[in-house]
Amino acid sequence: MINIAGVVSIVLFYLLILVVGIWAGRKKQSGNDSEEEVMLAGRSIGLFVGIFTMTATWVGGGYINGTAEAIYTSGLVWCQAPFGYALSLVFGGIFFANPMRKQGYITMLDPLQDSFGERMGGLLFLPALCGEVFWAAGILAALGATLSVIIDMDHRTSVILSSGIAIFYTLFGGLYSVAYTDVIQLFCIFIGLWMCIPFAWTNDHVRSLSDMDVDWIGHVEPKQRWFYIDYGLLLIFGGIPWQVYFQRVLSSKTAGRAQLLSYVAAAGCILMAIPPVLIGAIAKATPWNETDYKGPYPLTVDQTSMILPMVLQYLTPDFVSFFGLGAVSAAVMSSADSSVLSAASMFARNVYKLIFRQKASEMEIIWVMRVSIIIVGILATIMALTIPSIYGLWSMCSDLVYVILFPQLLMVVHFKKHCNTYGSLAAYIIALFIRLSGGEAILGLPALIHYPGYDEETNTQLFPFRTMAMLISLITLVFVSWWTKMMFESGKLPPSYDYFRCVVNIPEDVQRVGDPSEAGEQLSVMAGPLARSYGAATMAGKDERNGRINPALESDDDLPVAEAKRLNQQTAQTQVKKMLDSATGKPGGGGGGQREGMAMPNAEQDNTAF
C-alpha cells in the first residue's frame, strides 16, 4: 500500500525543484534563444552558483546510492568513485579547462570536429551519447529504487514521473534551470542525509563500527591489484571527457574561473561523499534480520543496490526518513537533467547543425535541441527500467568515454599538430574492439578474449585491459597520423588518395604552411596561371586548421560556401595581378613569364606569415 505521508513528502520536494527550475529559466534573456544562451547560460554563471553546479557534475543520485552500496558490499577501499571523480576534476582543471574556455567552444566535441572534421566528430558523438544516457539511466534507476522501498510506489511509475518533470523544466530553461536546481540539489543531499545519520547510528540494532565482525573497510586481494589500478584510472581520466563537465567549464565567465571551480568542486565531491560512506558503514553493521526488514537475508544484489533507502526506512523515525527521502529524490531528479541537456546539446550542434544543416538558424537549432531532450530522456528512462545494478551502470558508463574519447581529446587540445582524421578513425576502431572484446557482464556481453588473470567464476577481467585499450588507442592515433602525413607529403601516396582531405588534398587547393597566423584574417593568394596557394581563404581566422573553421567561433558571413570561395579566389587573383603590374611598372597586366617569375619572390615575401 502506498504510504501517503511519503507521497506528500515527495510531492513537496518535487514542487520545490520544479519551481526553482522554472524561475531560473526566466533568467534567460527575453527573446534571446541563441546556442550560448540556452546551452551555456550566456557564459554568465556566477561564482556561487558555479561552485554548486560544478560539484553537481558528479554528485547526484547515482553518486550517493552507489557510494553507500560500494561500502556495504566491498568496503571503503573499493569505493573509488568519490576519490576518482574528485581527481578527474583536478586534472580537468589543470589540463583542459583553461584552453577549452579560452577558445570559446560551445560543446566538448567542437575541438574534435575542428581537427578531424564534422563527420568524424559525429562518430565521436556516439560514445559521448552512450555515456550521458547511461549516467542519466543510473540516476533514474536509483530514484526508482528509493521510492519503491520507502513509500511502496511502483518502480516504473516513479522513474517515469521523475524523468518527465526533469525533462519539462530543462526544456523550459536550459542550463539556467540545470545550474540553479543544482544548488537546491546539493543542499537537499547534505542536510537530508546528515539529519538521518544520528538517528540511524544510534538505532538499537546497529552494532559498533569498531567491532571486528564489521568489516566496512575492505581489502584488495593480490590478484586484484591490477584490476583495482585499472578501475581507478578509468574513473580519473574517464571522468574528464564528459559534456556535463565541459558544459560547466564553458559556461564560466573566464578561463581562470573555470579552473577555480574545478578545484573547489573536487573538494566538494569528497565532502559530499562522507554521508553516504557513513550510511553504508551503518548498513554493514546492521543485522537486517533483526529489524523490521522482511526480505531475504543475507541481502541479494537487488537489495544492496537499495541499501541507502533501506537505512532511511528501517533505521530512522518516519518523519526523518520522509525528509531524507524527499531530499534524495529531489536531488536525483535534478541531477538527471544535466546529462539529458548535455547529450541534446551535442546532437543539435555537432551532429544536426555541423553535419546536416550548416545554414540552420539559431531558432531551428534550439528546437532540434528541445526535441533531442525529449528523446534522450526517453532513452534514459527505458534503460533505467531494464538494467539492474546502479553501481555497475555508474562505472560502465565511463568505459567507452575513457578508451575512445580521452586520448582524442587530449591530442586535439594539446598536440593537435600531431593528429589527423586517419589516426582518429583508426584509434576509434581499435579502442572499440579491445573494449568490447573484454566483455561486459552487466549487458550480457561475453568476453571474446580472456586476458591474463581472467576469473572464470565471476567472468571478470583482472587484467587492466581498459587502460591498455586507452594507451593503444593513443599510440595508434599518433602513429597513423604521422604515417599518413609522411606518406602523403613525401609523394609516396598521391593526393587523390587523401580521402578525408586533411593532409594534402585540401579543398580548393588551399594549403596550410606552418601554424595559423595570430594576426587575424589571412589572404589566399592565387598566382594566376601558376595556380598556387600561399595562404588560407579570406574567411579563415586564426583558429582555422586544415581548411576547416573552428565550429565554436561563429562566422558572420551568410554567403553560400561555394559563392564565398569563388569571390575569395577572384579577389586574390586581382591582388596578384596588381602586384605584378606594380613590379613591372605597367598599368595593365601583360607582364611576360620572365617578369612574373621575378615578381613572385616579392609576393612570397609579402606573405611570410604563411
Image: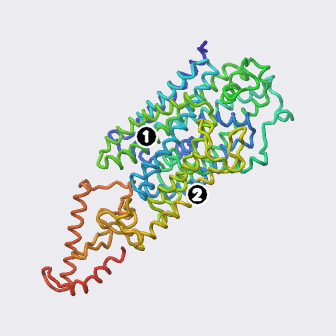
Quadrant housing the C terminus: bottom left
Q: In the visual, does 333 lie left or right of 35?
A: right
In the rendering, which numbered label is found on residue 472?
2
The image position of residue 348, as x and y in percent, is: 39, 43
Mark nearer the N terminus (2 vs 1): 1
Q: Which residue is mark 1?
A: 344
Name the quadrant containing residue 183. top right
Q: In the visual, does 463 lie left or right of 336?
A: right
> What secondary structure is marked by label 1?
helix
Work out whether residue 502 can be spotted. yes
Between label 2 and label 1, give the one nearer the viewer: 2
The image position of residue 482, as x and y in percent, is: 49, 67
Q: Give, as a three-letter code, the residue at label 2.
A: Ile
In three-dimensional space, the C-alpha distance between marks 2 and 1, rounded to whole angstroms, equals: 30 Å
Which of the pair 322/438 is nearer the observer? 438
The image position of residue 607, as x and y in percent, is: 32, 76
Q: Among all residues in the image, which is located at the extreme left?
A: 588
For image coordinates 52% across by 35% down, the residue present is 336
The image position of residue 340, as x and y in percent, is: 47, 37
115 lies above or below 70: below
Quadrant housing the N terminus: top right
Q: Within 10 Å of the Cα at label 2, are there few (<14), some (14-19), or many (20+) other Cα atoms?
A: some
Work out whether residue 261 can be spotted. no
394 lies above or below 554: above
For image coordinates 58% across by 26% down, the residue present is 144
